[in-house]
Image (cartoon, grey):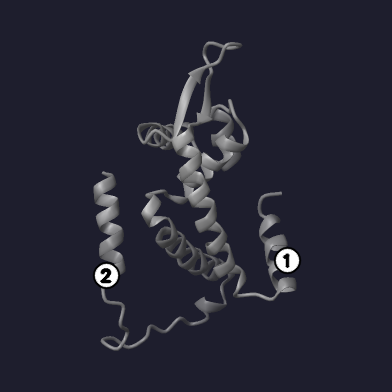
Amino acid sequence: MLMEQTSTRRERKSAPTTTSEKPALRHNKLVDNVGYQLRTAYVAVRRHFEAAMEKLDLTQKQTGVLWLIEANPAVSQIALANELGMDRASMMAIVDRLEERGLIVRKRSTEDGRRQELYVTAKGRKVLIQAKAAIHEHEKWISSKFTKSELAAFVDGLKRFTR
């Protein structure tokens, strides 16, 4: 499945994106819709992120999970799923993938035998260092679209959705 996702990403990148073949679509004020603008901005940011992480073969979710495990050794899958607003099955698939790659390990809790604790491996730390450097460049790309005060207001506005 990962091969399919990777090849699909490459196909999308190599597909022609010229608009000269067809006339532009009329939007009838759709471009004034906040939700539409958020969605199209998300797509642009996601594509840039995917390009930045391509060498590391990490998705946004995998990167976030790896980052949170490093910051919270012994964290449970359930705590991660709750933090990221994900269902347990999706979180398990991400954790399985990170574990298959040797980036994290699961250990049974000594306090609660039903609980699995998650830890970043040495290999995972090396990958995360590279990921953080790529994210830094990605964040610079996003930030370059705004002045400092605009960026601060934008980030504050986005945080209102999760407060």
**Is 12 drawn above or below residue 135 in the view shown?**
below
Local packing at callout 1 (Cα closer than 10 Å; few below 14, some 14-19, many 20+) is few
Q: Position of residue 20 (x, y in %)?
A: 30, 89
Which SS class for mark 1?
helix
Q: How many tags in the picture? A: 2
Image check: 4 left or right of 70? left
The quarter of the picture where residue 99 lies is top left
Which SS class for mark 2?
helix
**Residue at figure coordinates x 42%, y 50% from the top left:** 59
Q: Amino acid at mark 1?
A: Ala
The residue that mark 1 highlights is: 152
Q: Position of residue 125 (x, y in %)?
A: 51, 39
- Compute the Cα span from label 1 to label 2: 35 Å
Q: Position of residue 98 (x, y in %)?
A: 41, 36
Q: Position of residue 106 (x, y in %)?
A: 47, 24
Label whose residue precedes the other's in the sequence (1 or 2): 2
The one nearer the camera, 91 or 28, is 91
**Residue at figure coordinates x 31%, y 67% from the top left:** 13
Q: Which mark is residue 14?
A: 2
Local packing at callout 2 (Cα closer than 10 Å; few below 14, some 14-19, many 20+) is few
Q: Amino acid at mark 2?
A: Ser
